[in-house]
Amino acid sequence: MQNRSGSASVAGDERSSPVAFTVNGTRRELTLDNRTTLLDALREHLDLVGAKKGCDHGQCGSCTVLLEGRRVKSCLILAVTLDDCAITTVEGLAGPDQLSPLQEAFVAQDAFQCGYCTPGQLCSARGVLDEIAEGWPSAVTDDLTGAVRPTDAEIRERMAGNLCRCGAYPHIVAAIRETAGDR
Amino acid sequence: MREFRYRRPTDVDEAVALLGADPEAAYLAGGTNLVDLMKLGVQRPDLLVDVTRLPLGGIEPLPGGGLRVGATVRNSELAAHPLVRRDYPVLARALLAAASGQVRNMATTAGNLLQRTRCFYFQDTGKACNKRDPGSGCAARHGQNRELAILDWSEECVATHPSDLAVALAALDAVVEVAEPDGTRDVPFVELHRSPGEHPERETTLPRGALITAVRIPPLPAARRSAYLKVRDRASFAFAVGAVAAVLDLDGDMVRDVRLAYGAVAHRPWRAFRAETELRGRQFTPELAGQAADAELAAARPLRHNGFKVPLIRAITVRALTELAEAQA
Ligand SMILES: Cc1cc2nc3c(=O)[nH]c(=O)nc-3n(C[C@H](O)[C@H](O)[C@H](O)COP(=O)(O)OP(=O)(O)OC[C@H]3O[C@@H](n4cnc5c(N)ncnc54)[C@H](O)[C@@H]3O)c2cc1C
Ligand code: SF4
Ligand code: FES
Ligand code: FES
């Protein structure tokens, strides 16, 4: 059978796959068209619209979520590859009625204007704080074998994958630095 | 995006067999390049064979020194590994200078080496491109070619290889372990990628369906003094417009050993063998480093918009080597 994109080679029952993963602690079972990205699975199938579609090509960071605790771009991951994986989205960073210290700091530091990039910034920052705590170096770390400190330069470099069209960058850095200091 | 079937084998033979049975199949690793190109319609596989659950993870020290890096090790994990940070700074630096934290958490060793060019015309299905559509022409040859090659290009294709990791591995004389339908084989890293010639659609010397299983990095004590210098249009999160990987081993001020490789200058990561020959056994001076770069770049044929890359590569060669020499003084 011919489909819209003009390929006749994939039989109907092979175009989609069952997949089961955990999102914010809840197990989800879906059958998805193999082409579905994690971002679209979250937004279109699970009604979790926190992660945003900015560029859909890995370049803006607004779709950032945590996969097995590591920050990733959900627009470049096919959902059917994620069997048995654990995903955390911005909705899962804290409970429904409270904010995490990082989210509190974003509010206190006025780290956003329109807010479109914010869910991605928050998930990326969560990953950055863990990477620093584990001693992962970055491109601006002078001593590759030494300790890593959450300086402004380190935070800026590590957050380079998250664009903010409103230019809230200095406040985002301040919020992350404040949270790193509290740990 | 074209529809496709999806398989997730758990052993290498099965993965290789799946690819062998379908000429339109492709391996899927981190997906950061392939999924992007599928969205753009540049790549149209009808079957994706997911390699990320194959037993190809892990970074192991080798008995005689050196490291064996599994094909599915993520770029971030490799950059953070204590032995990489201590023994191969050029490798850690190249990885950390690439992409963003999120991309590095997804990107794998093998996927990085086999990522496709960032030539804008390759990514635009409305433009002529011999690499994407053999025989259609090359829109970049006389188009906007600031980012593209200065060395070893052909009339058929002037693209560059975009990987930073590959430049470091070229300098380190890595070896690529490959599984093919009729067995396994080692490929010296500098023989992995091809010059464009008349067939820019063929980017590596690997046969179709070959699976990279690991990369071995030989012991090289001198690599503890190594550097990766990358020039880009913004301070972070951008591909190179020029890059150099350098290892320098001095005995007093004499060059005992040196390894140099360039990025963003050619269709393949460019090992600068001629420059190395100029340097080896001589007294190191910044002037000598410049002469060595000149010897390598004598073959350069800049395109209309990228003449600046010749002095740029010369300058970063001198800077990288001089800084390494000063650190040993
Ligand atoms: C926004 C952005 C910025 C970037 N910036 C940089 C940068 O500055 N420097 C840089 O070096 N890179 C950069 N990259 C590219 C990135 O490093 C690559 O996309 C990544 O390394 C590819 O790895 P992957 O595992 O995601 O590969 P995939 O996308 O899964 O695969 C890439 C190719 O490799 C093949 N493949 C994968 N694994 C195997 C295997 N084991 N055997 C045989 N074939 C295999 C696939 O079939 C495919 O053809 C950037 C990417 C993005 C999205
Ligand atoms: S340079 Fe190569 S990749 Fe770019 S348009 Fe020409 S043929 Fe295509
Ligand atoms: S939407 Fe994923 S990086 Fe822009
Ligand atoms: S707050 Fe508007 S894009 Fe960042």
Image (cartoon, rainbow, N blue to C red):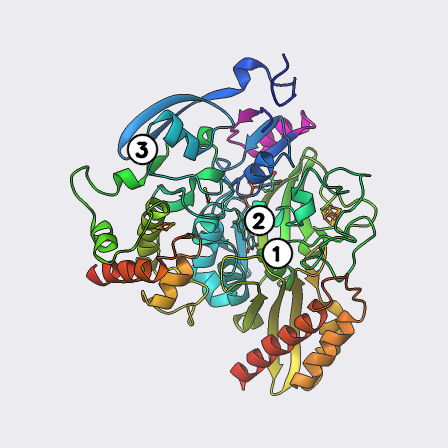
For the magenta stretch, what is the residue range? B5-24
Dot 3 amino acid type = Val
Choose the circle earlier in sequence order: 1 or 2.
Answer: 2
Mark 1 Cα shell of 10 Å, populated few (<14), some (14-19), many (≥20): many
Q: Which mark is residue B166?
A: 1
Contact (Cβ within 8 Å) of mark 1 with mark 2:
yes
What is the chain identity of the residue bearing mark 3? A
Disc 1 residue lies near ligand 1 with CB under 8 A: yes
Query: In this view of the protein, which residue sits in the foreground, A25 or B71?
Result: A25
Q: Which percent across, then down, holds residue A58? A: 49, 45
Q: Pointer 3: what residue?
A: A23
The answer to whether B113 is drawn above or below residue B303 in the figure is above
The answer to whether B103 is drawn above or below residue A15 in the figure is below
Give residue B219's quadrant in the image. Answer: bottom right
Q: Pointer 2: what residue?
A: B112
Q: Is residue B203 left or right of residue A118?
A: right
Q: Which percent across, then down, holds residue B254? A: 65, 85
Q: Is residue B212 left or right of residue A161?
A: right
What is the chain identity of the residue bearing mark 2? B
Query: In this view of the protein, which residue sits in the foreground, A80 or B120?
Result: B120
